[in-house]
Image (spheres, rainbow, N blue to C red):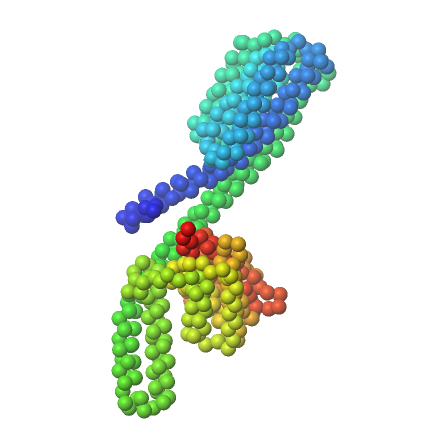
């Protein structure tokens, strides 16, 4: 069991949650950014091979071809190792991206050392490495990359193998140096445009995941507050409900009241409703971890949904209720009040929208329990479907309404499932709850 944070340190627990969420989002974005670096490195491998061949065989420049091709080969091997590392599935953090950029800067420095140092027009590819570092890295890592590239540039100005490449700046594009500068500029501009755009998209996706995680945490805190309120209200309602049950029991045995058939039926109906209220109160307290003596019972999925459908139909007034249990091979489980109340919420909403007909269908799809509630009402408004599961989105114009589907969605999400809603072409709406059996069923004995 993972220890839960106590109420004594809510701020610390929230801070830990925020940090863990941020680290997870950064790690996911790091994987995608490493993929972009790998693609960029393959571009560098191909570009260096073509440039070396062009400089040596076409322009007849004296360069150490074998040594430079060996450096390209080492870069390709490192890229293959990076691909294998991605398949491990471990998260990628800033330090790994920093080391990858250092390798790229080192390879570029060695190639420039072998081909003229700062007199090589491709020396300005350092700017690409600085740009990538500024986008990918944070804090001290960025300035470390800047400092290393400046040091490499200064070192190349003093130490390098000569390159017979006359400047001839007055010759315009006829100058090999000017042409090299143009090619370097085109490379920088193109690669910055393509890869920085992709990296920014990865970072925006990371920010979106962080925002979604924060929103979900706020929703969960809202649920906790509502749960505390409901638990307190359930405690307060327990005594008056017990008093009403005693009074109704006395009335039932009163000979004067029992002689009146109409009053006798009304007393029986009131007793049924009081019992239903007590059941709801007990369910709320059970969900909050405060049982009122009702122990969970071992049952099966088919039996559970059968009892659920029977209980709901027997305590609600409805013209027609269609129930189909197509679950198939039964599976053991422990009856869960929270799960039952979740389905009741959906059924109650369907009955409110369609008092004439409601359908409950239970099926099994692979390893999931699928519960579909269908009605013949007016359906969902388009804006409600777009904001499914958002609190206080209700068409009933009732203060505090709109929490039913919100709670249903969050309970399902806690169990690893999901809730979907749609309007049927023939009219009415359908809400579908899908829950993994692993979250609700007992493991079968071997």
Q: Is residue 391 left or right of residue 241?
A: right
Seen at 51% across and 26% down, the residue is 100
Seen at 56% across and 61% down, the residue is 422
User: How far across and how far down the image is residue 221, in percent?
Assistant: 38, 53
Relative vertical location of residue 444 with respect to residue 403 in this rendering, above or below: above
User: How far across and how far down the image is residue 138, in percent?
Assistant: 46, 31
Relative vertical location of residue 434 with respect to residue 252 in this rendering, above or below: above
Q: Is residue 55 left or right of residue 242?
A: right
Front residue (pair 289, 62): 289
> Residue 163: which quarter of the image?
top right
Seen at 65% across and 26% down, the residue is 186
User: How far across and how far down the image is residue 107, in percent?
Assistant: 55, 19
User: How far across and how far down the image is residue 436, in percent?
Assistant: 47, 54
- Look at the image and tell me whether residue 135 can be seen: no
- Look at the image and tell me whether residue 267 can be seen: yes
Q: Is residue 10 left or right of residue 200?
A: left
Front residue (pair 144, 301): 301
Seen at 26% across and 71% down, the residue is 239
Relative vertical location of residue 311 with respect to residue 55 in this rendering, above or below: below
> Residue 248: which quarter of the image?
bottom left
Tell which residue pokes out farthest to the front in this image: 446
């Amino acid at each position: 069991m993972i220890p839960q944070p106590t109420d004594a340190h809510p701020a610390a627990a929230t801070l830990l949650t925020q940090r863990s969420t941020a680290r997870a989002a950064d790690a996911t974005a790091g994987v995608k950014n490493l993929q972009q670096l790998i693609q960029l490195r393959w571009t560098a491998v191909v570009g260096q091979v073509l440039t070396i061949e062009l400089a040596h065989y076409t322009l007849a420049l004296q360069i150490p071809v074998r040594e430079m091709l060996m450096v390209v080969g080492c870069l390709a091997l490192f890229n293959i190792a990076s691909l294998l590392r991605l398949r491990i599935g471990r998260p990628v953090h800033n330090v790994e991206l920093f080391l990858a950029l250092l390798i790229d800067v080192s390879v570029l420095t060695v190639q420039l050392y072998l081909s003229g140092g700062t007199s090589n027009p491709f020396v300005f590819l350092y700017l690409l490495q600085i740009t990538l570092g500024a986008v990918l890295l944070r804090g001290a890592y960025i300035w470390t990359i800047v400092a290393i590239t400046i040091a490499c540039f200064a070192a190349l100005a003093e130490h390098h193998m000569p390159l017979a490449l006359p400047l001839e700046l007055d010759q315009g594009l006829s100058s090999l140096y000017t042409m090299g500068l143009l090619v370097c500029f085109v490379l920088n501009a193109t690669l910055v445009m393509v890869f920085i755009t992709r990296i920014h998209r990865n970072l925006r996706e990371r920010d979106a995941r962080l925002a979604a995680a924060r929103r979900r945490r706020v929703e969960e805190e809202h649920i906790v507050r509502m749960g505390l309120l409901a638990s307190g209200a359930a405690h307060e309602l327990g005594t008056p409900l017990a008093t009403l049950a005693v009074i109704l029991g006395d009335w039932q045995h009163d000979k004067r009241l029992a002689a009146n058939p109409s009053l006798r039926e009304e007393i029986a109906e009131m007793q049924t409703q009081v019992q239903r209220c007590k059941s709801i109160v007990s369910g709320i307290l059970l969900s909050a971890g405060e049982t009122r003596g009702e122990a969970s019972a071992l049952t099966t999925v088919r039996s559970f949904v059968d009892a659920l459908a029977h209980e709901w139909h027997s305590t609600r007034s409805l013209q027609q209720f269609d129930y189909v249990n197509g679950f198939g091979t039964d599976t053991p489980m422990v009856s869960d009040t929270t799960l039952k109340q979740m389905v009741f919420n959906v059924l109650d909403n369907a009955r409110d929208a369609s008092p004439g007909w409601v359908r409950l269908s239970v099926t099994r799809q692979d390893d999931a329990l699928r519960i579909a509630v269908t009605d013949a009402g007016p359906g969902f408004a388009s804006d409600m479907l777009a904001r499914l599961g958002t609190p206080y989105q209700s068409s009933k114009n009732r203060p505090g309404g709109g929490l039913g589907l919100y709670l249903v969605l969050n309970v399902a999400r806690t169990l690893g499932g999901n809730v979907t809603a749609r309007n049927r072409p023939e009219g009415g709406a359908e809400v579908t709850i899908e829950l993994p059996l692993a979250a609700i069923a007992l493991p079968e004995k071997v």
